[in-house]
Amino acid sequence: MITSLKELIVVLAIATVIFRLGRPIALRFTDALDYSRRRNVWFTLTAAAFISPNFWWFALLAAPLLVWAGRKDKNPLALYLLLLQVIPSIPVTVPLPGFNLLFDVDNYRLLSLCIMVPAAWRLRNDKDSARIRGMTAMDAAILVYGVLQVALFVVPDLPNHAIIADSFTNQLRRALLFFVDVYVLYYVSSRSCVSRQLIAEAQAAFCLACVVMASVAIFETLRHWLLYTDISLRWGNDLSVAIYKFRGGSLRAQASSGNTLVLGYLLAIALGFWEYLQSHISGKFPRYAVAGLLLLGILATYSRGPLIGAIVIYVIVFSLRLRKMVRFLLVGVGALSVALLFSDVSLGDRITQLLPFSKGPAGEEASYSISYRQRLAARSWELIQAHPLFGDQMALQKMQDLRQGEGIIDLVNAYADVTVLYGVVGLGMFVGVMLIALARTIRTARMSARNDPDLALLGSSLIACILGTLVMMATCSFILGYEKLFYMIAGIAAAYANLGRSPRPGAAAHRVATVRRSSAEC
């Protein structure tokens, strides 16, 4: 308990500074009452998590608080994104008399049940003509993918290698969880954001949460101290959150994300969102400070995939904004900067130790990682060729020789994961969601380029985040924050494309002006 209190004090101290300094920026995009309520809920849930002896004591406080906050909030999506990673995902089984289990519940599912499901119900009965109506191609792709997951039972990779048979009860459970965990998130994201201000408000809330995580990650790396491990040790049997991972002698931070790769991905997406938000911020210091903290947080994870994704996002945003000649100059300056960076012996050695094929323990670790990925790719291709259309639901039982030291078979590639288990049909539906979102976002951004540069810039940010997501998913399994943000970005992109069909610039401009006046008065 003493350890939890020390960790809580550090987290609250860091968060207090960030929420205080970030308030003037946040009030550019939201009103003061919503901001204060969200901040207070974040602090309450964080303190409750560190103090509660188990998840159920935490849920006893969190559930009514989340339902209340969701009903009060003008933009439930922003509230959800702020709280998405308030604590790590620590699944706890919900017992049911007469059955082995009902389903697992964690912070993600609690947020969805208490905030997003009620918001979806309210949106369903809302008559606002500006919202997306009826079934769209993106809705269809998500639902077809969900049907595949319900119909095709993937035998879980259990420690005792037991083969569990499917049942009608299991199918109902999978259908319910897909609806709560996936479709509701996409539905609320796509239907609730009827103006650019609501999209920007959701992005700002997510960036605020990520700046807190980035600051915690920097502290964890510098102090070699993971701050959220004690919660996982007290709440469940999954010790993955509590494992200290090192690379090049440095601790790989994970903050409240529960995974270093997931943390890097979240921060990279926040960096993409910030590229639009900063255009509404006066003064260079806050713009550079937020971007710098997010980038340092990514570096603190010592993960190559998110770093590459962040570079892709950054380059795409600037390429869409700048003229062709300036793009070439930018690339040239970037290449020269990298060369100068690695010419510094001390700093260069420090960084190259984290890259593949370098000398030293970190290089050996990276080489092993690449070797493992090569073996995994070869085995995955064999399974895909054997079952191309709908995949092989027994695949995990056929890959036992690829079990890692952590005791898991880590597919480390979302595309391989989906194709092996659900075939090219499943992959088509899975990737099709993002490809449709990308095409529609590009079309709306191009249409807005001349008449509405601000809307076009918002589109550029979303395009970069979509492409960055598609790149980063090739380096990580489809887990935790990856899954949640994947469908939420698709939903926000759908809402953005709908703005191009039924824009309401006057209302949006009035909303921005009102919020800015209120923030100035505060």
Image (tube, rainbow, N blue to C red):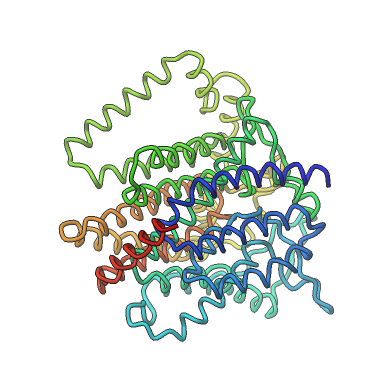
Q: Position of residue 329 (x, y in %)?
A: 22, 30
Q: Position of residue 143 (x, y in %)?
A: 48, 74
Quadrant for the C terminus in the image: bottom left
Nearest the eye: 366 or 449 = 449
Q: Is residue 372 above or below residue 237?
A: above
Is any atom of residue 309 visible in this view?
yes
Q: Left of 58 or right of it: where is 278?
A: left
Nearest the eye: 265 or 6 = 6
Q: Position of residue 426 (x, y in %)?
A: 48, 65
Q: Is residue 284 above or below residue 61?
A: above
Count of marks placed on residues:
0
Residue at image point 66% right, 69% down: 65
Q: Left of 11 or right of it: where is 339?
A: left
Residue at image point 71% right, 56% down: 90
Residue at image point 56% right, 48% down: 262
Is any atom of residue 378 visible in this view?
no
Nearest the eye: 162 or 240 = 240
The residue most toward the front is 521
Nearest the eye: 378 or 419 = 419
Q: Is residue 119 above or below residue 107?
A: below
Q: Left of 154 or right of it: where is 268?
A: left
